[in-house]
Image (cartoon, coloured by chain):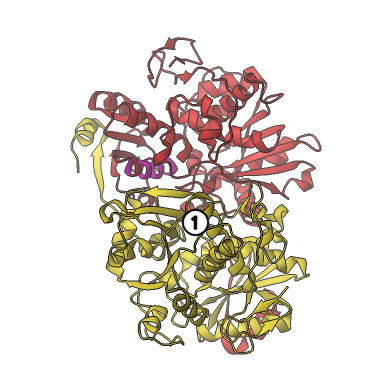
Chain colours: A yellow, B red
Amino acid sequence: MKLVCPICGKTYEEPVQRCECGEPVEFETFKGEPYIGKSVWERFWDFWPVEPALELSLGEGDTPLIRSKLGKELGVKLYLKNETANPTWSFKDRGTFLAMSYAVKVGYKAVGTVSTGNMAASVSAYASRFGLKAKILVSESASDEKLKAVSVYGGEVIRVRGDYGRLYFDSMKLGKRLGVYFMNSDNPFRVEGYKGIAFEIAEEISPDYVLIPTSSGGLFRGVAKGFIELHESGLIDRVPTLIAVQAEGCSPICRAFREGKIRIERFETPKTIAKAIATPSPPSGNAVLKLLREFGWKCVSVSDDKILEAQRKLAGEGLFVQPASATGIAALKKLELPEGAKVVSILTGSGLKTLSTTGQGKVRECHLERLENCIKNDS
Amino acid sequence: MKLVCPICGKTYEEPVQRCECGEPVEFETFKGEPYIGKSVWERFWDFWPVEPALELSLGEGDTPLIRSKLGKELGVKLYLKNETANPTWSFKDRGTFLAMSYAVKVGYKAVGTVSTGNMAASVSAYASRFGLKAKILVSESASDEKLKAVSVYGGEVIRVRGDYGRLYFDSMKLGKRLGVYFMNSDNPFRVEGYKGIAFEIAEEISPDYVLIPTSSGGLFRGVAKGFIELHESGLIDRVPTLIAVQAEGCSPICRAFREGKIRIERFETPKTIAKAIATPSPPSGNAVLKLLREFGWKCVSVSDDKILEAQRKLAGEGLFVQPASATGIAALKKLELPEGAKVVSILTGSGLKTLSTTGQGKVRECHLERLENCIKNDS
């Protein structure tokens, strides 16, 4: 087991979470070949840093890749990777499962995370499944709706007053001392779990572009590493162009990229409806920035109006996602991709999780005696 | 194409929805062999009454079958079929997709359904996906929470005042006249779509018992038909024992079964937390009753207390389901199944759909400065 810091290059023989320089470390590149198997864990067995605890899997991963009509007007071939079909209805389950496989293997009795949304629910659910205690640290502002969907799994939910950014790092330090394995958004095992998204896409198509809603940067790094490993293993001809998508109201990575900076600066007073990706100081921001530069990739930010429009368009195709998950589609028009390009957009989480921000559609009233007229007349 | 009435035996050469005797008709038994393919639609290609419109699939079906620890104390091997991983997070999508494939093939421009919950969302979503108009008829009592998750897909939602049971039949009659294809809960194509649950289970294990939350009876009939067809095709050795599970507060099928009746009587003043299966006059009730008798199967009803307890137990294993979906687990203890039996319980829909009925779990407050103590001390 060997980890390396993508920023300073220092290596580690044991699974630390952070480099001494403060950046997130990652596992060295895996190489291998695919096998026949039911789950992505089995088919890409060579590529995981720890043996996946298959007997405790909840069936995460192996999500549908759907051909979308939304690319038509822009002349691209658009595919949607529907991560809302995961056990807790977001992509987080892939990373949680792998990080939890490690935690239980080395004997942790408790795990934790810092999150108010998808990751909190995911860690709470898998902790219960794995028979571990869970310490779920949420910010003061977490809504009741979200807390319900987290606490239902039985994890211990602790609402913490104080700076949320500091909480991220404090939790990992304290966890180490107290024997609680914190799997925050850029935990190295978690990032490895997201590689499965790249693997599954590559099994079905050879995309030219992949649109990735980007917050802390963990998902982006995982998908990137997945494609890079497939390429280095000789399993795909080229790595697609990855596009990090952020909400304009909180786009620290795109800003730094645009301004030619090599370090992310905190995005003050974030304001966007895409709460799930509103991270002012993304922990993996510098690492994402480095990838974008090295590979000549892109970063695009989109307005809340466009995000909501994209959310409606996706629902109009049968896929109800949370605002953050619609950012990829919102970015499409802005990007002006070449005619005929094959594009995948990753739909990260279910719209049922943000129902309170969804407007009520039109509902007509009708009496049963007048049903014929009500059905005949369109609204 | 041949349909038969399971009650009076009359046959039809065209896809009517109801027999002249008033009962739901069903397709004759299909026989065939399995193929290699990614989706259940492809693998069981011989078994569908209409060609599935694969290019418009949203990836419904092929849901995880998960080994559960909850069977341990009862000495049974328990598996959970997680239908909450479908595109609109309930099993309804399987039936909707197949019924919609038929509707679009024969040229309908509009579809409809009568439902307040999972089926309404499913038909609304797939109508958008298929480019059809949708007329979603809901009852007066439908909650805002539910209507949001339906109207978001763009279907036309009509709230109808008047007898809900009558609405079911009126809608089909009117639909025929107005060119709107109503795919209500026991539409014959819909029922065929549910066979996929049986096919996928049989691909992985040979269950002794299958627990099925039962409301209108469409799901039960579909799963039954699936196993029967596999058996008649020589693909499985025996048909498992199917167990219809209802909520005590609305259990017209179990009551009629217990009392030796051959016809369901309306269950007056239904009262249960499992709203998704609270159907006082189940349209497929008599057909289910006949299946139960013919095969020597079982019907079990469970109390709301036990349903909520089962919902908590499932969440404690990482699976958050709606109350109706927990009835199978609630029934387990009551059933006293033989030691070592292989049992599958079908988890029909996501708990996120009934968040308003879910209690808030315990949430502790903590200041960042005291984080160490907060993490150390268990609640």
Asked if residue B87 shows in the view, the reply is yes
Q: Is the magenta stretch mostly helix, strand or loop?
A: helix
Q: Dot 1 falls on which chain?
A: A
- Tell me if residue B123 is in the magenta stretch: yes
Give the answer, above or below, for where A4 lies relative to B8: below
Q: Closest to the observer: A30 or A188?
A: A30
Q: Quadrant of the N terminus of chain B?
A: top left
Residue A139 as seen in the image, left or right of residue A56: left
Residue A35 drawn at (x, y percent): 66, 50
Which residue is tagged 1? A83
Disc 1 crowd, CA 10 A, few/some/many (<14, 14-19, 20+): many
**Is residue B295 placed above or below B220 in the rendered structure?**
above
Q: Quarter of the image holding residue B130?
A: top left
Report if residue A14 lies within the magenta region. no
- The x and y percentages for residue A238 are 49, 62
Occupied quadrant, residue B16:
top left
> Is B43 placed left or right of A296 in the picture?
right
Query: Which amino acid, by three-letter code, is at mark 1?
Result: Glu
Q: How many marks?
A: 1
A220, A250: nearer the viewer = A220
The magenta stretch spans which residues?
B117-128
Question: Residue A324: where, in percent of width, then height?
Answer: 40, 66
